[in-house]
Amino acid sequence: MEYHMLRKRSCLAAVMIAICWQTISGETNTSLSFTDVLKIAADSSISIHLSQNQTLSRIASARQANGSLLPSLSASASTSKRIPFRDDFSPPATADAGISLSYSLSAKTFYDRNSTILGKEAAEASEQQTRDDILLRAAQLFLNIVSTSSSIEVEDANLEYQKTQLEQVEAFYQSGRKSISDVLQQKTFLSEAQSRVLRAQHARDLARMELYSLLGIPFTREISFNEDEVWNLSENINSDSSFTQADPQEIFEISSIEAQKKSVLAAKESLRGAQLANLPSLGVSAGVSVDKTLSSTDREIGGPDGRVGVSLSFPIFDRFQRSTSVTRAEIDLQSEQLRLEQLSRDAALAFQRAMLDWRSARLQTGVVNDRLTSAQQSLEAVKERYAAGAATLTEVSSVNSQYLEARLSQVEAQLQVVDSYLNILHKSGRITTIIGSENEPEKGTVR
């Protein structure tokens, strides 16, 4: 049942991928929103498909383990004829048919079955963790595109300002108010602004290529990305003061820890099975058979004959197989427990670090806003002083650079708030809620 349900889910995912790809490939809709990117990444990533295949393999193993508790039924039919070396005797051919039922049971079989089922559950949890990781990766790549696109807008505005400034300086030069050195210096500033625009465009193209690769979109395809959801999410987070710190115990609900817990339980079942390998195993068999002699004088059918058998098997000397299996199982259990402890520590550290990044990002937002306001006022003042001849062009350029950096810092601070918020959702195992939450942050999550 679980196997068919997972196959059905995989088929639905394939249909969704086809629909998304048709949307991407269409001429009328080449824009993807933040939610669109996350949904496509959650269904089309190669890592997720590999994880799904691993889960399907574990489900098949679980079916096989359940089948080991069932009896086996087999049927057989055969015919034979002896070939004599004497010419005076020709034995008749014979044919026989039968059906047999056999069943064997041991304590180790039960524990091996339980271990396999737990391994299947661990694979399912690992698949969910892979999906969470891909969602975070896709979100970060999308934010990187938003960041680089915003940088291009800032650099383009600066380029236009430098062009306007050059025209003003040239006008002052023509009127004799400025020297030729001011014109040459402003041309240098203009060249630097053009170079900054090219570097920003290069960074944006690299960010797009990384996201294209994750989503499986051809690099030659032109896709636009709608940034409205990201900025709305940023505003909602910054404007809501009701966020509270999440319960640290929630970090133990992430899928990777759940998968490791299942692995520990599976190792315990394997150890119990190895310890009980010296118990007797029970075997039951039953069968019915008929035979017929194929000759001109004898056409009677013999049987049917039935048989029933019961057996108990006791291991006496197994060449140290049981003790070796128990030792290995104990080592495997200890290793799985150590991995769980290490994973729990890493998860706790990652969660606390995410909370620290969140608080720092919130504080940094207020600082950069004040910095931008001051830089803008300083730029206006120095421009007036330059027009009046009380400031040099170098001073104007220096203050403009400060204003430019303040604008870029403001964008980065806003996106850092969103990134730290998504990181908290990921570290607490709830990043999938961002897909269906219409980009509204959960109440009572972080502060």
Image (cartoon, helix red, strand yellow):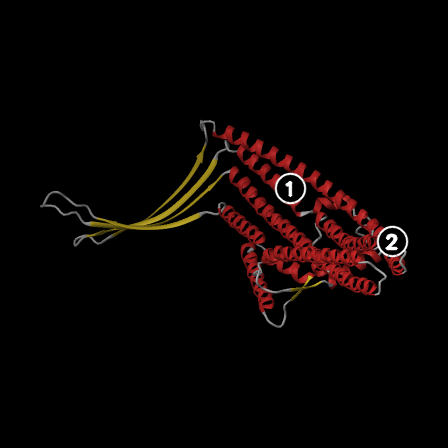
Amino acid type, mark 1: Lys
Q: Of callouts 1 and 2, which one flags the residue occurring earlier in the amino acid sequence?
A: 1
Give the x, y percent position of residue 10.
56, 58
Q: Residues within 10 Å of mark 1 (few under 14, many from 20)?
A: many
Q: Going by the image, does 134 lie left or right of 179?
A: left
Q: Please tell me which residue lies in front, 275 or 132.
A: 132
Q: Please tell me which residue lies in front, 387 or 38.
A: 387
Name the element at disc 2. Answer: helix
Q: Hey, which residue is sitting farthest bottom in the picture?
A: 28
Q: Residues within 10 Å of mark 2 (few under 14, many from 20)?
A: few
Residue 169 to residue 80: above or below: below
Residue 26 to residue 47: above or below: below
Q: Is residue 435 visible?
A: yes
Amino acid type, mark 2: Asp
Residue position marked by numbered label 2 in the rendering: 370
Q: Is residue 303 visible?
A: no
Residue plotted at (67% across, 37% down): 342
In the picture, the disc for residue 47 is none
In the picture, the disc for residue 261 is 1
Q: Going by the image, does 160 lie left or right of 225?
A: right
Residue plotted at (74% across, 55% down): 188
Q: Please tell me which residue lies in front, 292 or 156.
A: 156
Identify the image quadrant of residue 171.
Answer: bottom right
Name the element at disc 1. Answer: helix
